Image (spheres, rainbow, N blue to C red):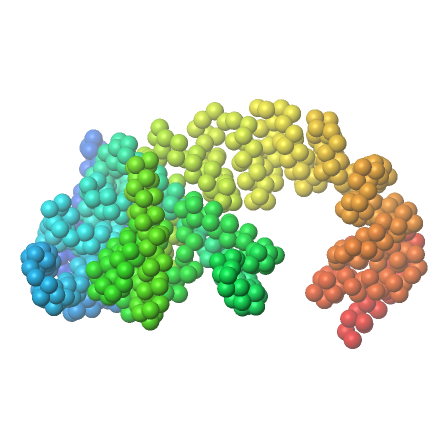
Amino acid sequence: MTASQIDSTYKAVVGLLQSGKLKLAFDKTRMLVNELQWGDINDQFEEMLQNYRLMLQYFITGVEDPDRKIIYNKLIAKLININSLLREELMMRNATSFEFTQKRYFPHKLHFSSTVDLYDSLLYFHQQKTMLDELSPDTEKDTKRLRNNFEKLLPDLFAVFWLNTRIRGDEKRVFQQILQTSYPGDLEKSLLISALTLNLWRMFDEEKLLLLLDACTHENMAVRQRALVGLCFILTKHNSLMPYYPAVRNRLVVLADDISIVEHLKNIIMLIIGTTETDRITKKMKEEILPEVMKISPMIKDKFDAETLMKSDEWDEENPEWNEILEQSGVADKLQELTELQMEGADVYMSTFSMLKNFPFFNETAHWFLAFDPDFSAVQELFEKNDKSILAAFLNNSVICNSDKYSFCLSALQMPYSQRDIMSRTFKAEAEQLEEISKDEAILNPNLTARNIARQYIQDLFRFFRIHPHHIDFQDMFNFSLDIHQTGFFDLLVSGSDIKTQIAEYYFTKKLYSQAIVLFSELIEEQEPSAALYQKIGFAYQKNSQIREALDAYIKSDMILPDDVWTVKKIALCFRLTGNYEKALEHYKHADFLKPHQYNTKMQIANCLIGLNRHKEALHIYADMEKTDPDNEKLWKAISWCAFVSKNIHQADYYMEKVLSNVPDATDLLNAGHIAFCKKDRSTALKHYQNSLELRDGNLQLTIDQINKDREFLVLNGVLPDEITLLSDELSFRTEQ
């Protein structure tokens, strides 16, 4: 079987089990069992099949078993377990992806003989380091050698819990021992959680998940936050399997009863959803901000060179023209937007640091998940030879994630020492300030540190799944992130909390309207709906181009809160978009009654009249509006068109000349061509059509289609049908030249 066939068979089995088709699931499972050819697996499979046959026999003979449902679900759970194991082992044989290639070969690259030996070696490092630290400085070489040996073991530790199919007795004990409070190594603790999360992401395993749940209540904040982040992803992916594992559900119920854990999870869920902004921010940086900065840099440099350097007595005075250049470029506004997003916790550094992940350091998968450690040999030199203030700056910076901190340090090490020294001194004042701010924040918001740890870890995960050299081989966690609210796990959390409302509002403000609709719809079913709730779901439907659904929601909002102008106008808009100009006109007039003299409302009333072919009435409205707003170009365009379709060519021409005196668009030029055509000025008409065509990127067919669309109005104003054809042909010939 190919890797694709193995994976599809596994998914088919799970689907059959969830739909209650056990016989077919057994048949599919047998295909995988026969492919693997493992005696103990085959024995387990046959035993499960026999148990199911016995269960069916009891059922047929009429024997009532009150535990039948429990036994049935246990059987499904066992089948899921064995299929997960079968998939894992068969994929290791057949798959060529990075993860399974690593799985095949990692036992041959390990620096230890057993997991217990690995644990002893790690513990030995911490014991020896403590001893050496207490001795004289002459032990520096011994310390470095010891450190290097330790760092070689970290990828091994990560690989064991990332790649092993099963975590057996020794592995489980080592996992638990390292997570004990008495164990001195924080790096190992964090790596263990990340490795276990990736393992569970690749294959479901109840025992592994229970270990992750244990870590969710760990007293070490970094361990706890990483475990909770991993839990959100794992339970989202494997949500459909949870009903068959009561032990897991019982543990989740216990977690949901812990108010502090629920608060952490709420923050984490919001942070995960917030990663949807990252791609947009990265695109904005690459396509909008950086190109503009590159454009204005020479201009600023010229100003600096020409004006500033010559003023030695005014060395610190910045040139006000720099800000002018910045304002004119539009970069300042874009940077302000990024600053605001950063304040909300958005990942604004992805585009910057994604280019700094090519160092050999990142060839080790484990290094993508390392907590930042200035003693790590790859970056230690930076802190040995430069001012220690840089250390404080990094350790207290909650914005930059761990892998980006390593990236920055590795990049800094490529600089000449003098530049590094300048950089280090630059950090000095900032470091002290950051330290004070961090202390104040910790006092004001005790949960802030936990949130920062979670945010940094989520960013580390995001970078791994998006820019790791082999990221295409991994199933991206962040393609699942938006489905958290549809899981049973989420349902446990929202009980008695406002998290569903918070997430719905977040989706709404971030213009993720499809997701917002799902949650707003649930909120409408679960609580007494308000006018505002119906307004928001209506708007979300509207932005999703689901106009009829939007109309229904707006009408319900109007029933709860009658005569709200915003709602009335939205109802009118929906009627207009569905072609019901009569109803649209009725509601726009009502909006005008509730709040008179609004420009947009008057304009829409006139537009509805045009849609009902009541052009003269529309023209009167436009004329009244012009009295109070004579320089409004939109009114000129509307009056010109309305006069044209009302056969008042003189008035249409008058207002079109006013439009043409500014900067006309393609539609304006097309309409100007129509008016000239009706005046028998065919050469001018042709010129206007040609100019309109140029603004439509030379799309001849689009222009001719538009002319034909307006054919009835041209004929109404005296143009003969064959004349339209002749002029269109001439336009085609000229376009070909």
Residue 127 location (% of width, % of height): 7, 56
Residue 76 location (% of width, % of height): 25, 45
Image quadrant where residue 536 sits: top right
Image quadrant where residue 120 sits: bottom left
- Picture layout, residue 393 above or below residue 525: below
Please name whichever residue, 420 or 152, is drawn nearer the observer in this view of the structure.
Answer: 420
Image quadrant where residue 288 sits: bottom right
- Picture layout, residue 305 above or below residue 662: below
Which residue lies most toward the front here?
313
Residue 214 location (% of width, % of height): 19, 42
Figure quadrant of the C terminus: bottom right
For the point 57% across and 56% down, the residue is 320
Please name whichever residue, 607 or 120, is drawn nearer the observer in this view of the structure.
Answer: 120
Figure quadrant of the N terminus: bottom left
241 relative to 703 in the view: left or right: left
Q: From this viewpoint, is residue 588 visible?
A: yes
410 relative to 279 in the view: left or right: left
For the point 74% across and 37% down, the residue is 599
Q: From this viewpoint, is residue 613 visible?
A: no
For the point 56% across and 40% down, the residue is 541
Residue 147 location (% of width, % of height): 15, 63
433 relative to 48 in the view: left or right: right
Please name whichever residue, 554 or 723, is drawn nearer the observer in this view of the structure.
Answer: 554
For the point 38% across and 52% down, the residue is 478
- Picture layout, residue 673 above or below residue 396: below
